[in-house]
Amino acid sequence: MPESWRDMDIANPTEEHSMLREMVRDFVREKVEPQALESDRNERFNLGLFREMGSMGLLGLTAPPEYGGAGMDATSVAIVNEELSYSDPGLCLAFLAHDQLFVNNLVHSGSDSQKERILPKVCSGEWVGCLGMSEPNQGTDVLGMETSAKQSDDGSWIINGRKMWITNGIIDDEGTPADIVWLYARTGTDERGRAEITTFLIESGMEGYSAGQKIEDKLGMRASTTAELVFENCVVPSENIVGMPGESKIHLMRNLEHERVALAAMSVGISRRCLADMNSYASEREAFGKQIRNFGQIQRHIGESWADYRAMRAYVYDTARQIDLSKAGQRLDSDGVKLFATTVAKNIADKAIQVMGGYGYVGEYVVERLWRDAKLLEIGGGTIESHQKNITKDLSTNSSAIEQ
């Protein structure tokens, strides 16, 4: 049997992927790490640094080159998310909301005219995008959303409602709303009594579109802004509807698979940094005349973290390899990998704090911040409870997946 298959690196399967990782890792070391602690403390989205990522070609990773994108795949997204989250998960979350929730959605569901007009602006960073799905009273229950849209006689649509917990909803200290929103709204009810969901492109300056409150004092992800978006008789022209009315559940579910793998990749970055820091500290710190890495209690924390990290990394990149961004079909593993990776990341961060003791508990040391940031990953993009439900449901009709 040829031995070449042993040389494949699942996290860097091609030279292009390796070059991307090296570029982003250098950027993180030189530009992201120096500002990460301050941005967290000040609850500040570093818009300038974000736009610099546009000049590097990172803000449209999966967009075609003719629109200013990089034309890459889900593995590339995982690489960038991992590397950014090693230092600043908050900045990565802002990137994810823009690149994966707005840009990738537009690439695969928008019309040619919408892509030609909007993609160059979001890929360059001129416009900052976001996704509006969660609401004050609705989260995981997407079909229960209350934001509604009604078509006027002239063909335009009138939207009313509020969206909550929107990453990039506000982009600066002046409360400026996102330049463009991928908005889900209810436009009717089907014959089974379920909501018909339609997608609209909401642009800054449209009548009736504004930012509400900025969500302050979050536990973690403080380097990204979270806000409420308000739609009061918001007038949207017919050319800003995406696809046909009522068909948004198709692209909603397709992009959720992509988002969940991307969030799991953030967990890899958080875990790698926490493991690196606790391992280094275990050699630097001494107790009773010995390095603390010689004590069984510390060995358990480091050993279990290493095994969990390696398992998570393999699962994330194996799932990313299978993701076809143009269609759904990987829900079982996209739910599974996010369920596993996000919980593991939180646990590894917890172990890092335990190993580092008092030093791990204070803001000057990164693991405290990563521990807070990791918790959001168990909630955003679908709660871990929703993943448990989906996996159990899917295995009831596809038990053969267990034997593959």
Image (cartoon, helix red, strand yellow):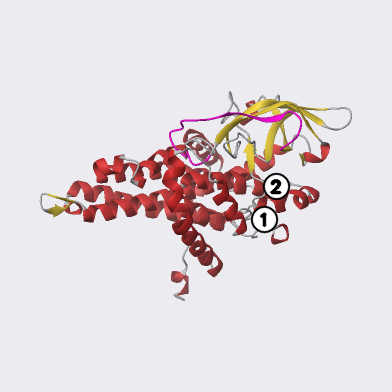
Position of residue 187 in the picture relative to residue 132 (left or right): right
Q: Is residue 403 above or below residue 26?
A: above
Q: Is residue 394 above or below residue 77?
A: above
Whether residue 202 appears in this view of the structure is: yes
Residue 388 in percent (x, y) is at 48, 36
Residue 13, image x, y percentages: 51, 65
Given residues 141 and 121, the one toward you in this image is 121
The amino acid type found where label 2 is placed reads: Leu
Within 10 Å of disc 1 (Cα), the crowding (few <14, some 14-19, many 20+) is many
Which stretch did the figure color magenta? 204-224
* Residue 340 showing in the rendered view: no
Circles 1 and 2: CB distance less than 8 Å?
yes
Residue at point 32%, 50% (across, down): 305
Residue 210 falls inside the magenta stretch: yes
Q: Which amino acid type corresponds to the residue marked 1 in the rendered image?
A: Ala
Q: Residue at x 44, y 41 (%)?
A: 40
Category of crowding for the residue at label 2, using alpha-carbon neighbours closer than 10 angstroms: few (below 14), some (14–19), many (at least 20):
many
Residue 99 on image: x %, y %: 61, 49
Q: Quadrant of the N terminus?
A: bottom left
Instruction: Looking at this view, name the residue that lies furthest to the right.
Output: 154
Identify the mark at residue 63; answer none if there is no mark.
Answer: 1
Mark before the other along the chain sequence, 1 or 2: 1
User: On the image, numbered disc 2 is attached to which residue?
Assistant: 106
Q: Is 279 placed left or right of 152 in the picture?
A: left
